[in-house]
Image (spheres, rainbow, N blue to C red):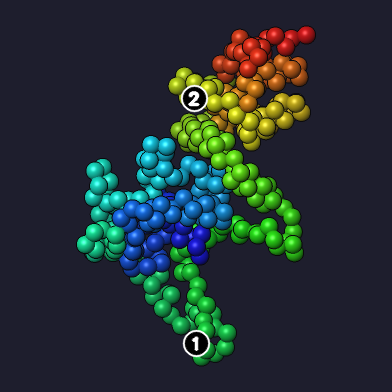
Amino acid sequence: HIALLGRALTSPEKEGHRIARHLADYMLVWAGGGGDDLAKSPHLARIANSVYRHMCPNDPTCRRFGFTQQGQPSEAMAASLLYRLHSHGKPGVEADKNRFREVYRSKYGKVRIYKILSVSKQSKEWVADPANRICDAPGSWYCKGQYPPALQKVLAEKKDFTQLEDFNAKKDADSDYQKKYFENLNDPSKASKMAEMNDILEKQKEKEKQKEGSPKTFRADPAIIAQLQNKWEDGEVTTQLWQLIANDDIDSLKGMIKQNPYVVFVRSGDGRGPLWWAYEHKRQRMINMFKRLGLSETDKDVNGIMPIDLID
């Protein structure tokens, strides 16, 4: 339940409203600075992402959701439902008047209450129907609530978080998520840089949406290339690329590039990228493909070595 509330609050305003309209009539926001709801919201985003993994793709600690070093909200935070309600009325910030209406504000603005507009009458009636309650015995006062059917599509996207201390749980791919989560907590600087890189890649993936064509027809944006090539970081993307090249898995590599052609421009911590690795492993077909995509044989790594220098 906390993860669902976290998702509603830290999602973009429109998406958050789509969830909230099936849960409540009003929303109370603790504002006014200090340890208010906005200050706690990065933790809410992490809780939401632990169950709804698309919230912060490849970023278990949700570094993309929070405040910048200048104290400004990140793009994800500024778009969130919680930020819109918390900061409604400040310069450049307005809650959607078609979805929320402020009905109360305390003297110093520390408490703000909003009426949720377009609340689902069908969901309210379903929840209020005693037949939809799960009681431990007929006529009992102890009855577990259920979410209305309208939220089942949202709930179907969840992946229940498994505690590390649960020794009875089977080990699966979720252990990788937990490993990355604690790695990011232990090295927040690296996590922030990786989150920024992943954010760039995700934006371009959405922007391009190349439903047809192949990497051969890709026209790269020089500004995006510069952003990626100036971030030398080891991470999931660089590791996956290296493995595909080392294993000569060109079909999987093409699939990865088709999803997001900009991945070929990432650089690892030593300044090397896909073209270096292709030359190193003598993958001529990959070399030709990378060159068509615009990778240069004369770029240099941290030691001044160019991809073309790796030719035997």
- Position of 83 compared to 45: left or right? left
Up-down relation of residue 76 to residue 120 (above or below): above
In which quadrant of the rendered view does residue 246 lie? top right
Label 1 Cα crowd, 10 Å radius (few <14 / some 14-19 / many 20+): few
Spatial separation of the CA atoms under disc 2 and disc 1: 59 Å
Give the percent coordinates (x, y) of residue 302. Answer: 63, 17
- Position of 246 compared to 70: left or right? right
Q: Residue at x 49, y 60 (%)?
A: 4
Instruction: Label 2, secondary structure: give it.
Output: helix
Q: Residue at x 43, y 74 (%)?
A: 126
Up-down relation of residue 83 to residue 108 (above or below): above
Of the residues under marks 2 and 1, which one precedes in the sequence?
Answer: 1
Residue 309 in view, yes or no: yes
Q: Residue at x 78, y 8 (%)?
A: 312
Proximity of marks 2 and 1: CB atoms separated by less than 8 Å: no
Label 2 Cα crowd, 10 Å radius (few <14 / some 14-19 / many 20+): few
Q: Residue at x 63, y 26 (%)?
A: 269
Q: Nearer the viewer, residue 35 or 156?
A: 35
Residue 52 in view, yes or no: no
Instruction: Label 1, secondary structure: give it.
Output: loop
Check residue 19 in the rendering and tell me which mark sits there, or answer none: none
Give the percent coordinates (x, y) of residue 262. Answer: 54, 27
Outermost residue, bottom side? 139
Give the percent coordinates (x, y) of residue 148. Answer: 46, 69
Give the percent coordinates (x, y) of residue 292. Answer: 59, 16
Q: Which residue is mark 1?
A: 141
Q: Which residue is mark 2?
A: 227
- Amino acid type assigned to the residue bearing label 1 in the image: Trp
Outermost residue, left side? 107
